[in-house]
Structures are given as structure tokens and as C-alpha cells.
Image (tube, helix red, strand yellow):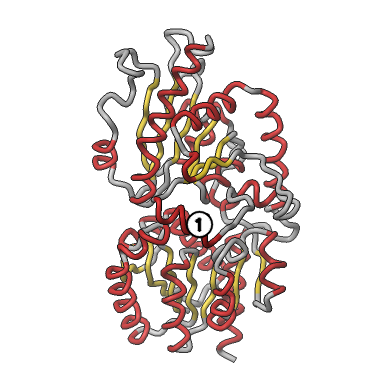
Amino acid sequence: MKIFISAAEASSDAHGAELLKALRAELPADETLDAFGIGGPKLQAAGLRAIADARDLLSMGFVEVLGRLPRILKILGIVSQELKRNRPDVAVVIDYPEFHLRLAKTLSHLKIPAIYYIPPKLWVWRKQRLKLLKDLFTRVLCIFPFEVEFYQREGLAVKYVGNPLLDELALDSPREAARQSLGLRSNDPVLAILPGSRPSELAQHLQLMIDAANLTALKLKKSGVLEPPRVLQVLLPLPETADLDEVRSQIDSDASETEGSGIALIDLRLSRGDSAQCLKAADAALVKSGTSTLEAALLGCPHAVIYRTNRLTAWLYRRVVRYRGPVGLVNLILKNDLDAPVRVAREILLEDVTPENLACEAVRLLTDQAVRTVMASKFHQIREQLSPAGIESPSAAAARELMEVVRCSTH
């Protein structure tokens, strides 16, 4: 069996790796698997023969995509030539519609069956893309239960397979074990900050979140919560694709000091590839909107959803998109409807993303036990919603759908 897989972002890379492992487990013993395409470190470690590296595609928002358009078009050309030369039985694209909808046109032209695994959030905006999905993809595999009705109503061949994070995360591992493995002090509070995986996300969020962590520590000290010698332990886990030296260079030399006092109130710990362990260990987190917010919920970490972008993208979002519903995955999963959403995790977005606002919310999450209790209950509810009866492994369910498409296309 020959399969083409394309995954660009850190979370998609992990989902693709689990899918590839599950597919190998599903194949008959006498059948081999040839997997090639676009992926990052995890997909390549799982056996993907990469014809392009996912890290070359990363971008965010309207403006950032335009900046990488020449590189995107070049990769599309390379992929197109390889697909013609080495035709797969099926193609799977994961998330990242800015690239994959362009790629799908090539797949359709070559008459290669295509599956969209983790489709774009068309129920938020750009619903005109629905016709593209219907015309270009044989099947759409959703990972959130609320998506299915929307896509079915539009006439797409859609299937809910469960959320792959349930395969990827050690959900029941003890919190203390995570803290010990990270070498954290048991009596000091722990705040995780996750600024995102794309270069543009780091540029928007990194220093701002560090400033917020310093301000959080100062507020905790002034309120008497953080008495010396206690400090706020701040975890900054980055994806495996990140350049640690480059990130360190972006962090101000006085990032761990408070307002020129020279007294360190935070212990900043930079790491790579261990976001789940950090979220498991943390008392609270500030998380860039995206997959990591759901990761935080499944691991039981109280958090706020953060998203800031450049002024032009923000203006377009407000004036053109005009979406007023929740953006955080936790809130989307738990919402009753778009007009009366349940906001469990506070969403701090666009121009509201300031160190002061982030710090105030971090203090609330770290100190308000009532808020923490409500969040714990809702997070448990989310885990149950994402674990439908009959789906023991989301990645295995997705692999079986993929194999069915191959069987149907060969008969």
C-alpha cells in the first residue's frame, strides 16, 4: 500500500505519526506500507519518507501566508512532480487549509483519492470553501463531535473518528510524577506559558507572555501568596521544530527580574518537545489558541486562551470575518450554541492581549479555588465527549477509514 501524507504543524505532525503507526498495525501481515510526503520530526521518525520538511510551510494568518507564498508554491511544485512519478493509493492531508486546499486541486487533477483529516474550521468563517471540500475530497474525518452535523448538512462524506490527543497523551499519569521528572520544587507555584509553534506566533506571544509571568509573580508577591524564598516556576515548552538558541535570543536578558528590582521572582525553564509533561505539572497555563488548549484541558490544567496577531489580520478578522462565537477548543466543545456559548476558559484576544490582562487572569487561575474546581469538572466532561462508544483509538479509527477508501477506489 502506498500513501501520501501531508502535515505541516507540530500538532499535525504528531497526529500524522500516530495515524501512520495505526495504519501499519491495521495492515495484513503480508502487505507493506510505503509512506511519503510532507512532515516534521515525529512523522519522519514514524517512517515517513519526507519530500519536503513541514517547517518550511509554517505561517499564520492572512499576511503571514502571503509572505511565504513563493516557498509554498515551490513546495507544491515539488510535491506535484513526485505524485505524478510515484502515484499513491490514497492521500491524507492534515489541517492547514492554506496549503492543503491548493494541494488538493493537484490530487484531484491526478485522480488520487484524498482524505481531509482534521478539516478547516469552516463553521467559523470562509464557508465558501465548503464546495471545495465537497469537490476535492473523498472523505472528511472530524476530530470534534460538533463538526459532524455541520458537514453532513452541507452534503460532505464525513465521519467522526475521535480526537487523536486521546492516543498521544498520558492522560492518567500522576501530576506529581510530572513535577518530579521536571525537577520542580513542590512548594512553589508553577505557571506554563505556551506561545505557539510557528515563528510568527512566537514573535507575537513570546516576550509578552514572559512579561506577563513576571507581572504575575509581582502580583502574587504583593498579595502575600509568594513569600520569599518562594518563586513562580515558569515553564516554557517549545515544539521540537523550534530553535532554542534563537528563542533564547528573543528573551530579554532581564526577563526573570521584576521591574528593575534585581530580585528574581520567577524561575524560567525553557524546554523543547515536552509540552504535555509541562501542562500536566503546571498549576495553571497561558496558552496560544489552538490544539494546545485542548491538550491543557485533557491534562487537567486550568488555562486561558490567548491569541494576538498583526493589526491588518486583526482588522480583517473583526471587519470581514465578524465571528462572535468562542475560539478556544474547550469552549467550542462545551458550547450550547453559537449565540449562547459556555465560556469555561477565558479568551483574551487581539488588542486585549496585554501583560496586565494576562497576569490578572494567571493570578485568578492560580489562586481562585472555585474557578479551578469548575474547570476540573468541565475538563472531565470534555474527555467523555471526545471518547465516543466504540472508538477505542481515534488514530486506529482514522486508519480504518483510510483503508476503506483505498478498497473502494480499487474496485
Q: How far from the left and from the top, in percent, is residue 84?
A: 35, 86
Q: Quadrant of residue 231?
A: top left
Along the line of sight, the residue nearer the viewer: 87 or 62: 62
Along the line of sight, the residue nearer the viewer: 111 or 212: 212
Location of residue 409 with respect to 26 vertically, above or below: below
Q: Residue at x 42, y 49 (%)?
A: 309
Count of labels in the image: 1
Q: Residue furthest front?
A: 319
Q: Is mark 1 on a helix, strand or loop?
A: helix
Q: Which amino acid does label 1 sit on?
A: Tyr
Q: How far from the left and from the top, in percent, is residue 222?
A: 49, 11
Which residue in the structure is indicated by mark 1?
317
Along the line of sight, the residue nearer the viewer: 202 or 45: 202
Q: Quadrant of the C terminus?
A: bottom right
Few, some or many residues within 10 Å of mark 1 (<14, 14–19, 20+): some
Along the line of sight, the residue nearer the viewer: 326 or 169: 326
Q: How far from the left and from the top, in percent, is residue 108?
A: 47, 85
- Kindly tell me whether residue 28 is visible in this rendering: no
- Kindly tell me whether residue 322 is visible in this rendering: yes
Q: Residue at x 35, y 81 (%)?
A: 80
Q: How far from the left and from the top, in percent, is residue 282?
A: 52, 30
